[in-house]
Amino acid sequence: MNDAYCPGAHERQLLRRCNNPLFPSSLRQVDEAAIIAARLRDEAEYDAFVQGFRVLLEEAVQLRPNEESEILLDLKARLDQAYTLLASLGGDTAPYKQGLHRLTATLMAAVQRAAAGDLLAGEELAQEQMARRQHYHLLEYPLVADLMRPDSPVKGEELVATLLSAPRDELDAALWLFAQEELEPLCREARALLTAAGTEQGRENLTAMESYLVRVGDS
C-alpha cells in the first residue's frame, strides 16, 4: 500500500506557484492559510465524489437487461465525467478508479449488445473504446487531469507558467490537449515570459513545446 500523501488539484496548483519565479509575485507567495483552504476544498470534493459514485453505482445496479440505449449512453457519459474528475482528486482514488473501470466495461457490453448487427455502430463503439483508453492514460498525469476539469484550478493567466514549470513527462502528455492554433500563441507567450523573468528555468520545456508545435504543423 502506498501511504504517501497525495494532494488534490487545488493544492497542487498552489504548490506549482509557490516561490516559482515564472509566476507573478502575487501568485508565488503562498502561505499556510492558503494551503489549508485548498486542502479543505480538495477534501470536500473527494467526499462529494464518493457520494456521487454511490449514486452511479446504484443506477448501474438497477439497469434492466434490455435497457433503452438513451439511458445507457447517458449513464456512460456520466461515468466518463466522473472518471475525469476523479483523476484530479487527492487521497486514495485507486478503488474508485477500479470501480469506474468495471462499471464502464459492464455498461459498454450492454451498449454493444444493443448495437449487435449494426456494423456502423460497432465501428463507432470500437473507436470510442480506443479513445477512452487514450483518455484514461493521459489522465494518469496530474497536470492533464487538472487541465481537463471544467473548473480547472489552472487559470488562463497561469497556464503558460504552469506548462513551463511542469515535469517533462506531464508536459509531453499535456501538449496533446492543445490544437496547433492554441499552441502557437502559448509558445509566443512562453518565450516572452522567460525573457521577462530573466531565468533559464523552463527553457527546456519551451523547446519541447516548440518542437511539438513543429511536429503538429508537419503532420
Image (cartoon, rainbow, N blue to C red):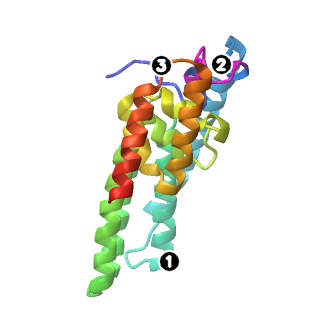
Foreground: 167 or 119? Answer: 167
Q: Earlier in the sequence, mark 1 or mark 3?
A: 1
Image location of residue 39, percent across then percent down: 62, 24
Q: Residues within 10 Å of mark 1 (few under 14, many from 20)?
A: few
Number of the front mark, 2 or 3: 3
According to the image, label 1 marks what residue? 70
Residue name at image x 54 percent, y 52 percent:
182
Looking at the image, is 36 positioned above or below residue 111?
above
Disc 2 designates what residue?
28
Q: Is residue 48 above or below residue 91?
A: below
Query: Which quadrant of the figure contains the C terminus?
Result: bottom left
**From this viewpoint, is residue 100 visible?**
yes
- Quarter holding residue 212: top left
- Residue in the foreground of this view, choosing between 151 and 160: 160
Q: Residues within 10 Å of mark 3 (few under 14, many from 20)?
A: few
Please state which of the two labelled residues, at mark 1 or mark 3, is closer to the viewer.
Answer: 3
> Which residue was labeled with disc 3?
200
What's under tag 2, amino acid-wise? Arg
Q: Amino acid at mark 3?
A: Glu
Mark 1 lies on a secondary structure that is helix
How far across and down, in percent of the image, does residue 13 sit?
A: 58, 28
Secondary structure state at the residue bearing disc 3: loop
The residue shown at (39%, 79%) is 66
Q: Is residue 140 visible?
A: no
Q: Is disc 2 placed on a helix, strand or loop?
A: helix
Q: Which residues are magenta?
A: 16-25
